[in-house]
Structures are given as C-alpha cells and as structure tokens.
Image (spheres, grey):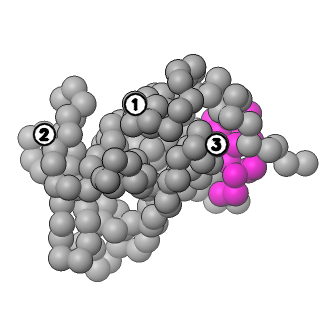
Amino acid sequence: MTTPFDLDGYLARIRWNGPREPTRTTLESVLRAHMLAVPFENLDVLLGRGIRIDVEGVYAKLVTARRGGYCFEHGTLLLAALQHLGFQPVAHAARVIQLRPRAEAPLTHMFLTVQMGGQTLVLDPGFGGHAPRVLVPLTGDEVRDGDDTHRMVRRGNDWALEARIDGVPTALWSS
C-alpha cells in the first residue's frame, strides 16, 4: 500500500503553517522549516537496505515514519511539496567535490532550482551539515544565514556550491 503525497501532512511534519502562495518568502520559509525539521540521515545506505526515491516511498519514510533521509529523499519530498504549493521546481544531479576532485566524483547528489523574479534560485535541502538553509541565487552573490555564508561560483561550464568553512571558501558540489 502506498502513501499519497498529502501537503497538509508534510507541512505538519515540518511544523510550518505560513501562507501557501508561491512567493519567495514562502519558498525560503518552507526550505528552512524542512531543513530544521527533517534531519539528514543515510542509515539505510550504510546498512545496505533498499531505498525508495519515489514520492510515495519518501513520504512514507520522512513524513509518516518521521525519519530523516539523504539528498535524493529530501529533494524528492521538497520537490513534491513545492509543486503542490504552485512552484515549478527542477531537480538536478551534482558531483560532491568537497573531498575529491570533480573528475573522480560521480553524480550522487540532488538539489533543486526554482525560477522566480527572473532569477534562478538554488535549494539544497539534503546536503547535511554544510547545506544552506536559505535560497542561493545562481549569480555568484554571497548569501548569509547567521555565521554561514554560501554562493554559487562558476567553474568552467559548471556551477559549484561554495561554503565558508572555518573562514575558507570550500566547494561542496558541482553540477
């Protein structure tokens, strides 16, 4: 038996009851609430268990069972929620390059973009500890959230998410 996506159930899981209009404020508020309520977790990956990344499977795990998930699960769940709120998110794959060269990194990360106000905004709900809890414009401009600073930087034909870690600009992933 599958669990259909239920927007009210999702919003209750992330403890968010704000406006449901597809505005920048709604987008950023839902992203932040999602990231604060649904933890990063990759236990199933580490234990060699099968992982479902379809909407019903992800909803059952992250919302109904109140567990955390890894990037593809977070991205799939947030993508569905944003669609139900009237946004048109796009899913993308990226290479995690924080600890290895891009040439050695497979496409193992998922992030989202949303077009809004003539700008492309990057949302990364499932990177874990260094992920931005704010929208990152695809412009190279830095965004701050408390002590965290992120920006998208151009690297040849790719874009990379960069975070300041201990004051040092560090590329996390590249698309």
Going by the numbered disc 1, the residue's amino acid type is Thr
Position of residue 62 relative to residue 127, above or below, is above
Q: Is residue 139 left or right of residue 29?
A: left
Total marks in image: 3
* Residue identifier under label 1: 25
- Which residue is situated farthest in the front direction here? 117
Residue nearest the observer in this picture, 108 or 120: 120
Q: Earlier in the sequence, mark 2 or mark 1?
A: 1
Q: Is residue 146 left or right of residue 114?
A: left
Task: Residue under label 3, please give it.
Answer: 84
> Element under label 2?
loop
Give the magenta range: 53-67
Mark 2 lies on residue? 166
Evaluate if marks 2 and 1 touch, with contact meaning CB atoms under 8 Å apart.
Answer: no
At 21% from the left edge and 45% from the top edge, which residue is drawn?
150
Magenta span: chief secondary structure: helix
